[in-house]
Image (cartoon, rainbow, N blue to C red):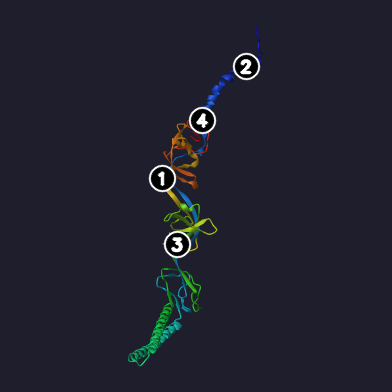
């Protein structure tokens, strides 16, 4: 018996047969279709200079400064400098009225002269009593009393001599001179003013070397070392960089904060910088020259160790690498085992593996 199929059913059977035959070929084509990677998924290995960076900020302060105070209580009779004046070592800054100070020296010396006469008389009495005592004409108590009087007067003489030295020193303090080359930064007194002892008279600063007192987070302070260079930008000098270096590191963190004070010195030979200027800077740590560094996400690990996936001849190849220094703030890791120009998969794509055919966008 012969069965005849209707035309529509025959067409369906034919299409089903074609689909069964073609499906393995389609699956095979899908298996070997290359994966297209965007430019953001890969990096080209290049040598570069790289370092960890610690950012700092602070105000400039002259390293060398001196605040002059009154070491006598007197009237200012000469005040030849103003704020901003440049002074040289030895220049006169303040002169006080010396009349009362000179009179005090004269009076102390007169007291010494009078005491010297008393000592001369007491020594003569002691000598006479000693002589009489040897002949039995004076008692031992009388001789001891005379000797005690001499010793007491000599002690008073030493005290008066110290008073004279103090008075002469006060007279010398009537003139104050600059101890170093600098600039007058403050002068709170005026000529003709009578000032008590220890009154602040003026401040002199040396602008040849400046210092930044910056706070560095405690988490970053282990990276900071003495003599490390710092690149600084100063307010008022756009586009210009000043170079300094770390000179001191505080042994303790600032109370109530998580920062440690770091002091950075800057040469100011041109005298452009002034105290109080705000500055920001970058302290480079672990500076490495001419290294190849990749994003941390590009480093893969298996039982054999660390490796990366390198694009080579249209597919991915396992490339063994040795890891070096890490720059966590920039999410980079130093690697060796690559050459400049190698194209490395840096995107976190876990489905990729060795041998996968790939293409890179734009290539």
Where disc 4 sits, the SS reads loop
Pointer 3 residue: 210
Whole-number angstrom distance, CA of label 2 to CA of label 4: 34 Å
Whole-number angstrom distance, CA of label 3 to CA of label 2: 92 Å
Res. 13 mark: 2
Would you place residue 307 above or below residue 111 in this image?
Answer: above
Please identify the quarter of the rendering in which residue 46 is found: top left
| Residue at the image position 48 percent from the left and 44 percent from the top | 332
Pointer 4 residue: 34
User: Tags 1 and 3 in contact by the CB under 8 Å rule?
Assistant: no
Where disc 1 sits, the SS reads strand
| Residue at the image position 55 percent from the left and 22 percent from the top | 24
Where disc 3 sits, the SS reads strand
Pointer 1 residue: 290
**Is residue 279 at all visible to an observer of this figure?**
no
User: Tags 4 and 3 in contact by the CB under 8 Å rule?
Assistant: no
| Residue at the image position 47 percent from the left and 42 percent from the top | 294
Closest to the observer: 270 or 109? 109
């Amino acid at each position: 018996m012969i069965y005849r199929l209707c035309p529509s059913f025959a067409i369906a059977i034919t299409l089903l047969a074609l689909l069964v035959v073609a499906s393995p070929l389609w699956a095979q084509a899908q298996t070997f279709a290359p994966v297209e990677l965007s430019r953001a998924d890969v990096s080209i290995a290049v040598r570069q200079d790289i370092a960890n960076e610690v950012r700092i900020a602070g105000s400039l302060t002259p390293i060398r400064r001196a605040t002059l105070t009154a070491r006598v209580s007197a009237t200012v009779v000469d005040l030849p400098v103003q704020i901003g004046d440049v002074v040289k070592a030895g220049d006169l800054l303040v002169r006080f009225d010396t009349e009362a100070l000179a009179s005090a020296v004269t009076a102390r010396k007169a007291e010494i002269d009078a005491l010297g006469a008393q000592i001369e008389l007491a020594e003569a009495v002691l000598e006479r009593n000693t002589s009489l005592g040897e002949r039995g004409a004076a008692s031992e108590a009388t001789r001891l009393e005379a000797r005690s009087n001499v010793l007491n007067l000599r002690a008073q003489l030493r005290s008066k001599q110290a008073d004279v030295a103090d008075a002469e020193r006060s007279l010398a303090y009537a003139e104050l001179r600059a101890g170093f080359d600098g600039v007058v930064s403050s002068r709170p007194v005026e000529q003709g003013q009578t000032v008590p002892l220890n009154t602040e008279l003026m401040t002199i600063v040396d602008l040849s070397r400046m210092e930044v007192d910056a706070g560095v987070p405690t988490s970053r302070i282990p990276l900071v070392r003495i003599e490390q260079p710092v690149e600084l930008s100063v307010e008022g000098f756009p586009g210009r960089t000043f170079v300094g270096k770390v000179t001191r590191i505080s042994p303790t963190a600032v109370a109530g904060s998580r920062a440690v004070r770091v002091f950075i010195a800057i040469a100011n030979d041109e005298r452009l910088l002034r105290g109080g200027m705000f500055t920001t800077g970058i302290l480079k740590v672990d500076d490495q020259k001419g290294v190849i560094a990749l994003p941390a996400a590009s480093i893969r690990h298996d039982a054999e160790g660390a490796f990366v996936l390198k694009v080579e001849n249209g597919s991915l190849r396992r490339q063994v690498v040795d890891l070096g220094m890490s720059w966590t703030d920039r999410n980079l890791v130093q690697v060796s085992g690559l050459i400049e120009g190698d194209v490395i998969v840096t995107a976190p794509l876990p489905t990729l593996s060795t041998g996968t055919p790939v293409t890179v966008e734009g290539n």
